[in-house]
């Protein structure tokens, strides 16, 4: 193979953590990959489309709760806090919170740098007097917050029930890490999806328009592009299933025929019907979510939910 001039530069752009996680995940039995790698720029854009789908209730339900109860959060949190948002994405829900509590600063954290910079610039234009201090990084790993907020009390913001994407043990670890990062006087506002009718849950993760399927399959496109893979897109189908024993929706990429492919020089085989488990979304009852928060070092202080009990917004105080 002729090595072209641009080949070394392309190799240097490979995220070593992405390469490691994908190769390890494809080498497991059963195969699985961390959901954080969904969110390249295209994945982030597709997820924003998902949040507008009629089947996908979490975003509109949580947004309505923020609009209705933002003043309640403001009264409980007090003035002068820095809002630190974990997994900010497009920050679509954030303006409702910022308008309600009038914070001293806003620190969005996200792994998708381009997407984060765009959304941060948009928020800075909408709130010209508010310091907006984006941090590009994986909130599952150690992070440093901007020095500008070192003396400010903090309000962590973790919307979207992203905590549900983690196994309970890892979720507790993350909550403890947030507790350490945010400090002694911190508070945390967190969205948590509730257990509900199975068909409604599956529809939310397998929409009629196929946007969630495109979001799931985009992971293969990213692997092929960034890790020199040759995984056949038409060899996989999106699957969403409810695991009642673990109270979670699972997303899988299922092989529709026997497959042989390579990624970053490593070769893999999948039989027809074999899957790559790409995401879990755990759902919590009210008692479960309080147990989870307390195990993570947070004392639930208040909670709001919609009339149907689909989704909960919990405000907690550092224990």
Image: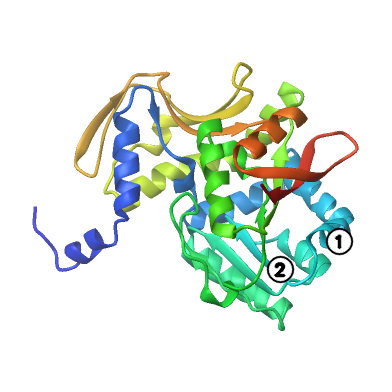
Residue at left 34%, top 22%? 29
Distance Cα–Cα, label 2 vs label 1: 12 Å
The residue at the far top in this view is 245
Percent of width and height locating residue 32? 41, 31
Quarter of the image holding residue 53?
A: top right
Quick check: 191 above or below 183? above
Label 2: which secondary element: loop
Q: Which residue is mark 1?
A: 75
The residue at the far left in this view is 2
Percent of width and height locating residue 153? 67, 66
Q: Which residue is mark 2?
A: 81
Percent of width and height locating residue 55? 74, 38
Describe residue 25's horizontal placement relative to residue 252 as left or right.
left
Say whether disc 2 or disc 1 marks the residue closer to the N-terminus: 1
Residue at left 54%, top 71%? 117
Percent of width and height locating residue 189? 72, 52
Residue at left 72%, top 62%? 94
Label 1: which secondary element: helix
Q: In the image shown, does 171 or 291 lie closer to the viewer?
A: 291
Residue at left 57%, top 73%? 133
Quarter of the image holding residue 22?
A: top left
Q: Are marks 2 and 1 in contact (CB under 8 Å)?
A: no
């Amino acid at each position: 193979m002729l090595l072209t001039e641009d080949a070394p530069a392309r190799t240097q752009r490979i995220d070593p953590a992405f390469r490691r996680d994908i190769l390890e995940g494809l080498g497991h039995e059963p195969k699985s990959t961390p959901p954080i790698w969904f969110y390249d720029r295209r994945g982030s854009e597709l997820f924003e489309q998902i949040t507008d789908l009629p089947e996908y209730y979490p975003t509109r339900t949580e947004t309505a709760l923020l609009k209705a109860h933002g003043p309640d959060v403001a009264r409980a949190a007090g003035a002068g806090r820095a809002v630190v948002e974990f997994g900010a994405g497009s920050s679509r829900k954030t303006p409702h919170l910022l308008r309600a509590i009038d914070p001293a600063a806003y620190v969005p954290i996200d792994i998708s740098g381009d997407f984060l910079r765009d959304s941060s610039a948009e928020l800075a234009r909408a709130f010209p007097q508010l310091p907006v201090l984006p941090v590009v990084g994986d909130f599952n790993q150690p992070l440093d917050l901007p020095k500008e907020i070192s003396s400010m009390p903090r309000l962590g913001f973790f919307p979207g029930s992203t905590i549900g994407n983690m196994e309970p043990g890892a979720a507790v670890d993350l909550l403890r890490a947030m507790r350490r990062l945010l400090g002694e006087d911190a508070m945390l506002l967190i969205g948590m999806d509730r257990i509900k009718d199975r068909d409604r849950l599956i529809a939310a993760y397998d929409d009629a328009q196929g946007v969630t399927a495109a979001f799931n399959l985009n992971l293969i496109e990213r692997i092929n592009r960034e890790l020199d893979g040759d995984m056949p897109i038409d060899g996989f189908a999106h699957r969403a299933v409810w695991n009642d024993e673990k109270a979670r929706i699972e997303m899988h990429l299922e092989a529709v025929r026997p497959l042989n492919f390579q990624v970053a020089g490593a070769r893999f085989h999948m039989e027809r019907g074999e899957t790559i488990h790409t995401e879990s979304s755990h759902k919590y009852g009210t008692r479960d979510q309080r147990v989870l928060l307390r195990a993570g070092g947070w004392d639930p202080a208040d909670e709001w939910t919609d009339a149907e009990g689909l989704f909960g917004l919990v405000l907690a105080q550092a224990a």
